[in-house]
Amino acid sequence: MESIKDKVAIVGMGCTRFGERWDKGVEDLVVEAAYEAFEDAGIEPEAVQAAWVGTVFSGLSALTLAPLQLQYVPMTRVENMCATGSEALRGAAYAVAAGVCDVALAVGVEKLKDAGTTGVKGPSIVGDNQEGASGIGPGYSAPASFAYLATRYFHHYKIPPEEGRRLLAQIAVKNHHNGSLNPKAHFQNELTVAQAVNAPIVAWPLGLYDCCGVSDGAAAAVVTRADLARKFRPDPIYIKSMQINVGARQGTTLPNYDFVHIEENVLGSRRAYAEAGIKDPRRELSCAEVHDCFSIHELIIYEDLGFSRRGGAREDIEAGTFALAGELPVNTDGGLKCFGHPLGASGLRMMYEVYKQLQGKAGPRQVNNPRLGLTHNLGGNAGNGVCSCIIVGNER
Amino acid sequence: MAGIRSIGVYLPVYRLHRDAVAQVWRGRDGAGARAVAGYDEDSVTMAVAAALDCLKRGKTAPDGLYLATTTAPYREKQAAAIVAAATDLPDTCRTADFTDSVRSGTAALRAALDAVAAGSARSVLVAAADSRPAAAQGNLEMVLGDGAAALAIGDDDVIAEVEEVYSLYNDFTDYWRAADDKFIRAAEGRFIDEAGYFPTMTAAVDGLLKKCKLAPTDISKYVYYAADARQHAGLARRLKLDKARVQPPLYDAIGNSGTAAGFLMLAAALETARPGDKILFAAYSDGADAFILRVTDKIKQFQKSQIITPRLAGKVNIGYGQYLTWRALVPVEVSTLPERTALSLPARWRERKTVTALYGAKCKQCGTPQISQIGQTPRVCVNCQARDQFEPYKFSDKKGTLFSYTIDQLQPTLNPPGVNGVVDFEGGGRLICELTDCPPEQARVGLPVAMTYRKMFVSRGIINYFWKAMPAD
């Protein structure tokens, strides 16, 4: 079995400002993100030989890319819940690796704020989607589906809930600090632990600042063969691994699942490390963009992805390990917490940050001596998920 | 001789104290409380709970189920079939709704006794449930209550034989609800008593005693329906009954639950009845049905656990505001969360075993019980990946433990905040589901839970019933 490692490079990326883009439609966001990527890659739109677009709610089929006016190009829409943006990139990269095209485009887009309602359609994912139209799924919100992790984590590690909430608050505070340095973030304000723990409860034990925002946004990438990459730019970013790991609802069906880890994360990241040749992710990764849809998930990701030992996230959080100046900066752009989570866009938005970091272009958020970066998404929820892990590097 | 093999009851955990109502309307201070069906309960769900209680108390395999209620959820569509399905009765079971009168409970009882006596049925479950609508600020709002009872009628192993029955009808308009009425209307109180209730009930009791040549003192206990406690006491005086022989109507603690009310009193009477006791049981409305029951030796075994007393007090006191919203007596703000997609009737039908009786499957190869939270019956085992090696496995009767939980402030519910949990079943299997009858402060890891049939939401007029977890008794 071959691997994707060093076969494909990202040579251009774009990312819109995320937020409540009331005056912009899906077409505006697609054009903004894709044209920034074209300019960054130094190509004209005509150079695109194939395209993938990821969206969950904001478009059917690849006609979602029609606003770009690419002329009769093979295009595909993909959907894989919260990993949708990463899935679009995977489609483009695999096509290039297969040798069927040399320049491919990946776009992720979502306009959640057009729904006219609060939040993502959470219950639909677990309860009354096409697969479960019998309508028996519980009617709880998306935050509730991740709150089970917090309840159980606190119970498992004997952390009093108020202490646990302060611990989670520190994750939000870190991400808000990073977001305050990012003009593309939805939320650019600093946050204090006191503000976070005193905010209203959304789904106990999670409060307002334990939950990511609800935003509109799009991001895009231009990929090409690794051996052609330097013809586009001097600092291409090489794909080291791309892994999607999808569960079969084992955790929500079998009582042996513990709700203090997510198996899809563990196995997906292990496979990604193996493909990329990484042995010690905490030391070898320069930065990571992970799926902090809810603060408790970022905490569990530290352990699932091997950044912290099992049960050791607390000491690492308290030591500032994942802060901008820490040992392994996580969510340097502000994460889902500050960007919100336009589902189709998030995976590519994360890659945009890692790409800029590895090129040394992350401005006030720049990490030192970057070599390798990771993006991670988890769609669905605990015991019931779709995990994506992508690792990229600035050397071939 | 045909009689009662088992009796079960269901009373909601919620109580609305009458003084809480009186306070709002500056009315007379009310005494006691009324039982209130939860926001996710109706006559169908309460009947299911009573039927399951009845089946648990007395081993019986019914081949019929009659449901009596004046508050069926549909104008057209049988409620008894829903109750039979949730109770997991065999599909050859005969089902029928008895309705439109609070005396329909005893109409169903008579039909069941006749079927068993005629040999056309082996055992018939008679379930009665009501949650009758009363307008705000009125007398009935204080008087009524919600509840259900179920009796298993059979020919052998009975705890009480039905020795004689006497019925009369009387086209009398005391309480009524026309097709377009949202609430029950009532005639003038003294007219109701003097022209209707007292003479009709007196005629029924006298007629029955005469028919079976019994003197009033031959009766150990008089158990009879009345519209309210005052009327109930009034009849005892008219009939000059010894107070010790009159079963209290329980209205002070739970209110008048219509078709179920008399059966609930009967359950209370049977808790203390002795073998050989004769009970006169009478129901009223548009006439009367009166029965002589003779308690058998089997009652001793049946009395090992109390039937209704532990449930009388309720567990959760609610405010008048909660009552108003649960009963849709005030408009409530709609949720700003996305709406659920409409129910698919084909999907619901396809997964009916899961939806109605909470069936999952057990893998014959590895023995793993499993149920999907979206209803799909498994084809490939989640544990050993064997294909199509399943036998049906029922979860609705399994005890469970709360593995994790969350209190959801965003969840659209008439009883916010939403309480949800990960339930692990004794014997295996896990379900993530809503919790009900569980105040948020009661939720904890390790909480013992039981499953209960409830309303989830309404889609295009279709009531989406499913199972939730509740704190176990």
Image (cartoon, coloured by chain):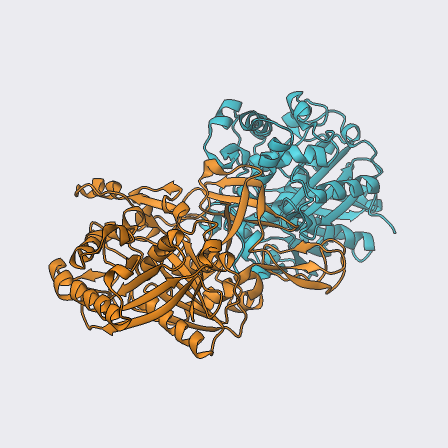
Describe residue B2's horizontal placement relative to residue A206 as left or right.
left
Colour that chain A carries in the picture:
cyan
Describe residue A235's horizontal placement relative to residue A109 as left or right.
right
Report whether residue A32 is seen: no
Q: Position of residue B152 (x, y in %)?
A: 45, 64
Colour that chain B carries in the picture:
orange
Q: Position of residue A308 (x, y in %)?
A: 72, 29
Q: Quadrant of residue B274?
A: bottom left
Above/below status of A159 relative to A97: above
Q: Position of residue A169 (x, y in %)?
A: 56, 27
Describe residue B178's horizontal placement relative to residue B456 as left or right.
left
Above/below status of A278 relative to A62: above
Q: Residue furthest top?
A: A319
Report whether residue B37 is seen: yes
Residue nearer the viewer, A390 or A319: A319
Q: Position of residue B404 (x, y in %)?
A: 58, 40
Above/below status of A168 relative to A275: above
Q: Quadrant of residue B108?
A: bottom left
Residue nearer the viewer, A161 or B285: B285
